[in-house]
Image (tube, rainbow, N blue to C red):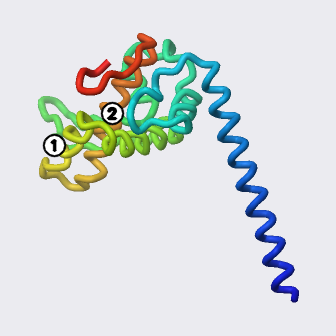
Amino acid sequence: DSVNLAMASLIRVIRTLQEQIKSLNKAIEDHLATIPQTLDTVPGIGPIFAAGILAEIGDINQFKNHRQLAKFAGLAWTEHQSGNFTAAQSRLILSGNRYLRYYLMEAANSVRVHDPVFARYYAQKLAEPKTFATKRALALTARKLVRLVDSLLRTNRIYKPEGGV
């Protein structure tokens, strides 16, 4: 009987948490409705990704260009050079906003499934012979998404597939 009591208690907790998640998702969607929204016009970016990206970026005008935004997100590569030597391979920087990087990487993974432009770009980068090809291709796709996000937020326009912004 104590097992049944514990199970019933856990089931009530799970149901309560599910209701809270639903109400939070509704609150996020309601709040996003008050903001001029361009990110959710990109196939694969829903209200959660859009809200997360917008929350982490804040005001887009604090960045001069998409390169600064990408560096802020941690989607830039380290530079290894000395004199005339420049390394052919480098890794992603370890600094940057990890939450924004997470949202952009996950959104890029979703967008590549729903948008043929991003799917082709991902496939092209995946085909290039490099180590860690999958992670590299996804990071490069996220970097492409950063350029799109920057452009959409600065111009306040909707996304048109195959034609860019």
Residue 66 on image: x %, y %: 37, 21
Amino acid at pointer 2: Arg
* SS at circle 2: helix
Amino acid at pointer 1: Gln
Q: Which residue in the structure is indicated by mark 1?
A: 124
Residue 70 on image: x %, y %: 39, 29
Of residues 100 and 5, the one drawn nearer to the viewer in this rendering: 5
Of residues 152 and 12, the one drawn nearer to the viewer in this rendering: 12
Packing grade of label 2 (10 A; few <14, some 14-19, many >=20) is: many
Quadrant holding the C terminus: top left
In this view, which residue lies farthest toward the bottom? 1
Relative placement, left or right, of 11 versus 54 is: right
Q: Give the vertical position of 13 relative to 136 (above or below).
A: below
Which residue is depicted at the point 23% across and 26% down? 162
Residue 121 on image: x %, y %: 21, 38
User: Marks 1/2: CA distance?
Assistant: 14 Å
Quadrant holding the N terminus: bottom right
Which residue is depicted at the point 33% across and 33% down? 143
Q: Which residue in the structure is indicated by mark 2?
A: 143
Q: Quadrant of residue 27?
A: top right
